[in-house]
Image (cartoon, rainbow, N blue to C red):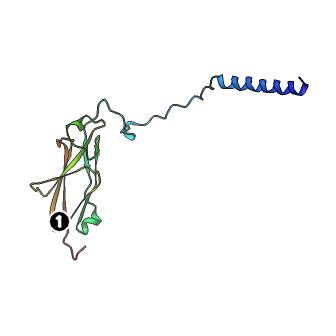
Amino acid sequence: MPALGKFALTSALLTAVLATAACSAPPPAPAAAAPPAAVAAGDWSPAPVVPLPSQPPPSLVVDAPLPEQLAMGLVVLRYRAENLRIVPVYGPAALDVSPRIGHIHVTVDDAAWHWADGSGEPLIIQSLPAGSHKVWIGLADPTHKILDEKTVNFVVPVQSGHH
């Protein structure tokens, strides 16, 4: 075998041996990551993607009507649920969902009827006559059992024209 051929064969064998050694070597150990910074319990809610072994009771928070809209005869009520996610899911099987889910019931001026809402969006009520009104909001589980409730009282002012 000519000298150049031996060199080429030796070089090819050496490359194959090095490639095989590189492929079979264990991967380098990852650098130690710093532990995540501690977060105060009140600043961070549990991820809504894992079941929770125990949950605090749900509660409802409702703001007063937005004043600018109320002055125009439009009632906009912002609300939020704590320890419960508002979603349009109903029925007994949904009681087993964790984290807890539910919806709201709404009654205006002690009407004999109410409506349910699972959107989580602000309530918008229009065309109420001028004067005192109240809106009852009940936080309900998927079987419509009321877990918390709030009543908002407000006055719709007399309008000088149409809005």
Instruction: Indicate the quadrant containing the N terminus: top left, top right, bottom left or bottom right.
Output: top right
* Residue position marked by numbered label 1 in the rendering: 128
| Residues packed near mark 1 inside 10 Å, few (<14), some (14 to 19) or many (20 plus) | some
Image spot of residue 21 (x, y percent): 70, 22
**Residue at 57%, 28% in the rendered image:** 32
**Residue at 22%, 68% in the rendered image:** 73
Image spot of residue 2 (x, y percent): 90, 25
- Quick one: 49 or 153, which is closer to the camera? 49
Whether 158 is drawn above or below 116: the answer is below
Q: Which amino acid, mark 1?
A: Leu
Is 162 positioned to the left or the right of 31 in the image? left
Whether 52 is drawn above or below 153: the answer is above
Image spot of residue 77 (x, y percent): 25, 57
Image spot of residue 65 (x, y percent): 25, 59
Is 107 positioned to the left or the right of 53 in the image? left
Residue sitting at the far right? 3
**Residue at 89%, 28% in the rendered image:** 4
Marker count (numbered): 1
Whether 151 is drawn above or below 47: the answer is below
Classify mark 1: helix, strand or loop.
Answer: loop
Quadrant of the rendered image containing residue 75: bottom left
Residue sitting at the far bottom? 161
Instruction: Indicate the quadrant containing the C terminus: top left, top right, bottom left or bottom right.
Output: bottom left
